Image (tube, rainbow, N blue to C red):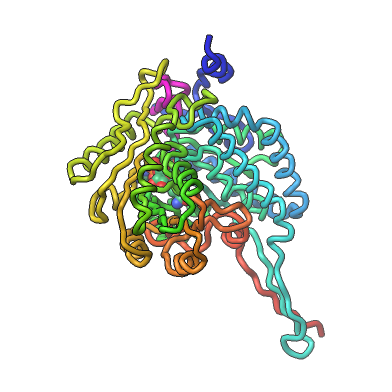
């Protein structure tokens, strides 16, 4: 038996029918509609997930609404004790959770461990809610009159999250919301429900009061029912731009707060003075980490001036060395994409690139992985001679495909980024402070990397995004999350 096969045996192969978590209980859905959850590396069914009913959503909303009445009065230092316990449990079960992430999402186990670490960091920051949600005051706004500004929880919030970070994305929101005294409903991606299910099992073990956190599985039907519930005060969404826009419009039309993160097309600019080795290492991580299915993944390399030839050669050389395999195999650098359906979509983009005249200098189509004949694998691809108007330079591919565009200067590079509809992330690689400063100042994206290929904000900072990558104003993580999950009340006091 190979080492990879031994490792595979350490993961539960079939998780059964996924349950909902409502009012502190794990409950079977009564729906007749179930979807298979598959391991994208093997194509094997690992669980079934319910498309829960409107009645089940109503029950979860009701439970959260009831729980809010007492949870809001639990002092912040007591509320955050549950998060300290949750964090300890996440630490204790880190490896188990990472393996579930890889099993249902496909990403390499190294990427999955990184994801779990980022999830834990958000729980850590949310434990500071007592300090973070403090208000402010001013004595003597008029003679003998004082004024205070308090931050208070609002009620029931929910999160609707995507497939690409099954354990982490929900933690950009949920720990902050409950630490601030709100109650919560999670709607995992129906493609990867197991990781959040496992997280909520851990949270349940902390003894958190019933109804504070609820989980309802499903897809559009559950989302619509949440957005139509008057008791739901706000929604955090992460996913593709079309759905982000839909959720934002429906939520705000129904009077809710909304923060909706959408899709991305991230450009990497390499200047002639970039340090080639380090730049290429970063580019490889950015283009191919998570098989290109990160919202911060690099997608297009804008090679400025003379750097074009050498960087192309080195990128190609490095991309060829990436080992594609089952993510649970420690030696695999890159796993499959999420599903056969998504594989077809990415392959469609590659065909389109070829049709529009780009030169496919590394072709990952038809890659095969020993022992995984039914996996949704695509090897690393590199397109050269791409022009900014091509589909592969414009649209989010969400797969392991890098496109190289030759540009004459930084101005042209920034112009291409400005013209794109998305504004999630962009990076520059340079040794010149002036170019870096200009890039940082001008580029219209929310997360900027300077000699950093994946500009992922740590949890003290907002996870930003602009243009069609974000609808709303307050972001997830850090102080923005605290602002989103509280409302301000001003009290003016005079004692006679
Ligand atoms: P998706 O939009 O298909 O699904 C996201 C969530 O929305 C899921 O929970 C899904 O059940 C729900 N949903 C899907 N269609 C819906 C509809 N018509 N009405 C209501 N709800 C619906 O996204 P995905 O494929 O799971 O995730 C990939 C996308 O997420 C990419 O576009 C990626 O860029 C984006 N993403 C963005 C960020 C960010 O920070 N901006 C982070 C991670 C992922």
Query: Does 364 sit above or below residue 208?
Result: above
* Image point (45%, 53%), residue name: 261
| Span colored in magenta | 33-53
Q: Position of residue 29 (x, y in %)?
A: 49, 29
* Image point (66%, 55%), residue name: 180
Residue 230 visible here? yes
- Decide if residue 109 is on the left or right side of residue 288: right
Query: Does 458 sit above or below residue 473?
Result: above
- Whether residue 186 is in magenta: the answer is no
In which quarter of the view is residue 60 placed? top right
Identity of the residue furthest to the bottom in this view: 143
Of the pair 249 and 348, the residue shown nearer to us: 348
Q: Position of residue 239 (x, y in %)?
A: 42, 47
Q: Position of residue 418 (x, y in %)?
A: 35, 64
Q: Quadrant of the C terminus?
A: bottom right
In which quarter of the view is residue 206 placed? top right
Q: How many marks?
A: 0
Identity of the residue furthest to the right in this view: 496
Identity of the residue furthest to the top in this view: 1
Residue 221 visible here? no
- Decide if residue 50 is on the left or right side of residue 481: left
* Image point (33%, 37%), residue name: 381
Query: Does 112 sit above or below residue 229?
Result: above
- Whether residue 44 is in magenta: the answer is yes
Of the four image quadrants, the one with ligand 1 is: top left
Q: Position of residue 5 (x, y in %)?
A: 52, 15
């Amino acid at each position: 038996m190979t080492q990879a096969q031994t490792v595979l045996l350490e993961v539960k192969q079939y998780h059964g029918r996924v349950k909902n978590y409502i009012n502190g209980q794990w409950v079977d859905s009564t729906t007749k509609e179930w979807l298979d959850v598959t391991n994208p590396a093997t194509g094997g069914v690992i669980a079934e997930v319910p498309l829960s009913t409107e009645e089940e959503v109503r029950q979860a909303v009701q439970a959260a609404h009831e729980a809010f009445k007492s949870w809001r009065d639990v002092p912040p230092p007591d509320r955050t004790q549950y998060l300290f316990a949750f964090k300890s449990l996440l630490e204790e079960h880190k490896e188990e959770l990472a393996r579930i992430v890889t099993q249902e999402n496909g990403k390499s186990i190294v990427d999955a461990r990184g994801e779990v670490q980022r999830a834990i960091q958000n729980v850590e920051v949310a434990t500071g809610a007592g300090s973070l949600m403090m208000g402010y005051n001013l004595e003597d706004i008029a003679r003998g009159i004082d004024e205070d500004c308090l931050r208070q929880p609002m009620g029931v919030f929910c999160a609707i999250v995507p497939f690409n970070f099954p354990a982490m994305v929900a933690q950009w929101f949920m720990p902050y919301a409950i630490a601030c005294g709100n109650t919560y409903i999670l709607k995992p991606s129906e493609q990867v429900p197991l990781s959040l299910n496992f997280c909520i099992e851990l949270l349940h073990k902390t003894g958190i009061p019933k109804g504070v956190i609820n989980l309802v599985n499903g897809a559009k039907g559950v989302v619509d029912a949440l957005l139509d519930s008057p008791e739901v005060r706000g929604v955090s969404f992460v996913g593709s731009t079309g759905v982000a826009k839909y959720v934002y419009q429906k939520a705000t039309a129904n009077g809710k707060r909304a923060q909706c993160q959408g899709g991305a097309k991230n450009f990497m600019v390499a200047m002639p003075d970039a340090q080639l080795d380090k730049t290429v290492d970063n580019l490889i991580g950015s283009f191919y980490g998570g098989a290109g299915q990160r919202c911060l993944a690099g997608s297009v390399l804008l090679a400025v001036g003379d750097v074009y030839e050498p960087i192309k050669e080195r990128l190609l050389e490095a991309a060829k060395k990436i080992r594609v395999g089952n993510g649970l195999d420690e030696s695999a650098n890159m796993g499959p994409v999420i599903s056969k359906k998504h594989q077809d979509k990415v392959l469609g983009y590659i065909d389109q690139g070829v049709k529009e005249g780009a030169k496919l200098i590394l072709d990952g189509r038809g890659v095969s992985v020993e022992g995984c004949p039914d996996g949704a694998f695509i090897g690393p691809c590199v397109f050269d001679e791409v022009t900014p108007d091509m589909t592969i330079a414009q649209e989010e591919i969400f797969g392991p495909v890098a496109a190289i565009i030759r540009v004459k200067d930084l101005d042209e590079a920034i112009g291409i980024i400005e013209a794109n509809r998305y504004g999630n992330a962009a990076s520059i690689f340079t040794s010149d402070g002036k170019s870096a400063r200009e890039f940082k100042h001008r580029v219209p994206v929310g997360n900027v990397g300077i000699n950093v290929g994946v500009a992922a904000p740590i949890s003290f900072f907002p996870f930003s995004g602009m243009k069609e990558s974000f609808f709303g104003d307050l972001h997830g993580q850090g102080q923005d999350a605290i602002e989103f999950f509280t409302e301000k009340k001003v009290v003016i006091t005079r004692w006679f």
